[in-house]
Image (cartoon, grey):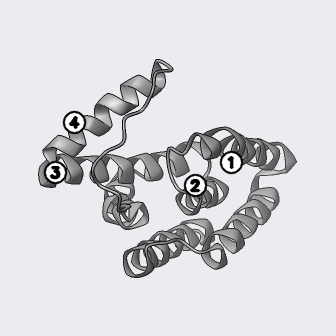
């Protein structure tokens, strides 16, 4: 197991527990993880791959962030995963957690889950998003942690 894989596992576990306990993923976890990931990427893969990861992270922050699809803590977690694991693996880990969260919502609150799916379709088509009844957030980092073993099966 390489250092990037160990740091990714530590990031996923730490942020998952923190998000569940405090309902947020703090910068003290995500920003050092991003820096370490980019530093290790530069050492192992060179400047080209590091620049690609930085550009992808900026795209996430500047485009997806303002859309309000996810909280900025979760977005920074996604950026840290990309920095540590690479674009494909980091995104796979993040989206696996999103799928587990969506399954949880569909099982525990089917009406809200279906409304979320309808809102996603509306957003893709440029339509107006309807507010759901639920005002509480879900601990996405916890669901990323729950889905992480599936990623480990595929590597």
Callouts 1 and 2 close, C-beta under 8 Å:
yes
Q: Residue at x 47, y 23 (%)?
A: 124
Q: Which mark is residue 75?
A: 2
Tag 1's secondary structure? helix
Quick one: 14 or 18, which is closer to the camera?
A: 18
Tag 4 or tag 2, which sits nearer the N-term?
2
Which label's residue is closer to the chain start, 2 or 3? Answer: 2
Above or below: residue 41 compared with residue 132: below
**Cβ atoms at labels 3 and 1 below 8 Å apart:** no
Tag 3 residue: 109
Q: CA distance from mark 3 to mark 1?
A: 30 Å
Q: Secondary structure at mark 3?
A: loop
Q: Position of residue 100 (x, y in %)?
A: 28, 52
Give the Cα distance between marks 2 and 3. Answer: 24 Å
Comparing labels 2 and 3, the label whose residue is closer to the camera: 3
Place of residue 126 in the rendered image (x, y in percent of width and height, measured from the top left): 51, 20
Q: Which residue is mark 1?
A: 61
Mark 3 packing: few (<14 Cα in 10 Å), some, or many (20+)? few
């Amino acid at each position: 197991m390489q250092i990037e894989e160990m740091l990714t596992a530590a990031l996923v576990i730490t942020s998952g527990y923190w998000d569940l306990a405090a309902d947020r993923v703090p910068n003290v976890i995500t920003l050092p993880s991003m820096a370490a990931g980019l530093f290790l990427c530069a050492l192992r893969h060179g400047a080209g791959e590091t620049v690609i990861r930085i550009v992808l992270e900026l795209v996430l922050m500047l485009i997806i962030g303002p859309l309000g699809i996810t909280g900025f803590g979760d977005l920074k977690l996604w950026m840290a995963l990309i920095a540590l694991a690479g674009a494909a693996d980091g995104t796979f880990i993040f989206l696996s957690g999103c799928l587990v969260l969506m399954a949880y919502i569909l099982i525990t609150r089917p009406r809200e889950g279906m409304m979320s799916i309808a809102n996603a379709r509306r957003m893709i088509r440029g339509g107006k998003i309807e507010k759901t009844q639920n005002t509480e957030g879900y601990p996405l980092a916890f669901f990323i942690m729950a889905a992480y073993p599936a990623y480990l099966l595929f590597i």
